Structure formats: structure tokens, C-alpha cells
Amino acid sequence: MGIVRTVEWSLSVAPVEAERRVRDALLAVGMEAEHHAGTIVATSKRSMLKNRWAAEVTIDLAPLHSGTQATCRVDMAGTKHYALLDEIGGCPVRRGTSVTAVPAVVRR
């Protein structure tokens, strides 16, 4: 598709909870996500308003001694890879009546 950028996040929750929070965050920012055996694959359409190309995001989740390691790869044209990851990582996720967030568990 284009240029690939990779970032690693350490999450302070178990892999099952990390997978749920990451999928919810992807959905909250308008990305369609699929989960396959420890890997989340999501696609983003091109956004003229955000000046951003279409992207494919792959997030591999692996157990870490104190939580979960998430290896995030963004494949897209242009230079907005990190802006897209910031949008995903900073997304509050509404769950019933409480709000949880990916940044609450991400140690960058």
C-alpha cells in the first residue's frame, strides 16, 4: 500500500482486556477491525478532512510479564502514520455507563 511504520505499546492489562480495548478504540475512530489469533487487522478509508490516505493497521498482541505488548504497524501513503496511532491511542471508549481508554493502559 505505501510506507510502513511500526510502534510498540506496552499495556498494563491482560491480553484479553487489551484486545477488547484496542478493538473498541479502532471502532470508535471509525475503523473496521477483525481479530485473528492474537492479531487485530483494521482498515481506514481515505479522509480528505484529516488530510490522510487510506491505511491498514495491524496490531499483534502478545503476553508480557506485567500485561500485554502491542506491536502496531501502519501501512499507508503519506506521513500521517503517527497521527493515526495517536488518534487510536488517545481514544476514550464508552462501555455501558463508564468510559475506559487505551491511554490509561498504554506505557509509551
Image (cartoon, rainbow, N blue to C red):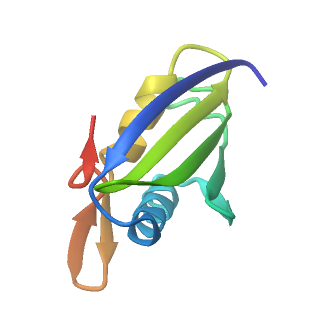
The quadrant holding residue 83 is top left
Q: Nearer the viewer, residue 92 or 53?
A: 92
Q: Which residue does the image show at 20% across and 54% down from the upper left? A: 104
- List the single residue furthest toward the right: 1
Please state which of residues 47 and 94 is positioned toward the viewer in this rendering. 94
Q: Residue at x 27, y 56 (%)?
A: 12
Q: Is residue 28 above or below residue 16?
A: above
- Quick check: can you spot residue 90? yes
Quarter the C terminus occupies: top left
The quarter of the picture where the N terminus appears is top right
Please name the residue shown 62% across and 41% down the image: 57
In the image, farthest residue toward the front: 65
Using the image as rendered, state which of residue 108 and residue 85 is in the foreground: 108
Residue 26, image x, y percentages: 50, 55
- Who's the residue at 46% across and 71% down the image? 16
Identify whether 89 is placed above or below 86. below
Asked whether 101 or 8 is in front, the reply is: 8
Tell me residue 31's x, y (percent): 58, 53
Q: Is residue 27 left or right of residue 93?
A: right
Number of marks drawn: 0
Q: Is residue 50 visible?
A: no
Q: Measured from the top left, where is residue 22 in percent x and y?
A: 45, 58
Question: Residue 90's x, y, as percent?
Answer: 30, 45
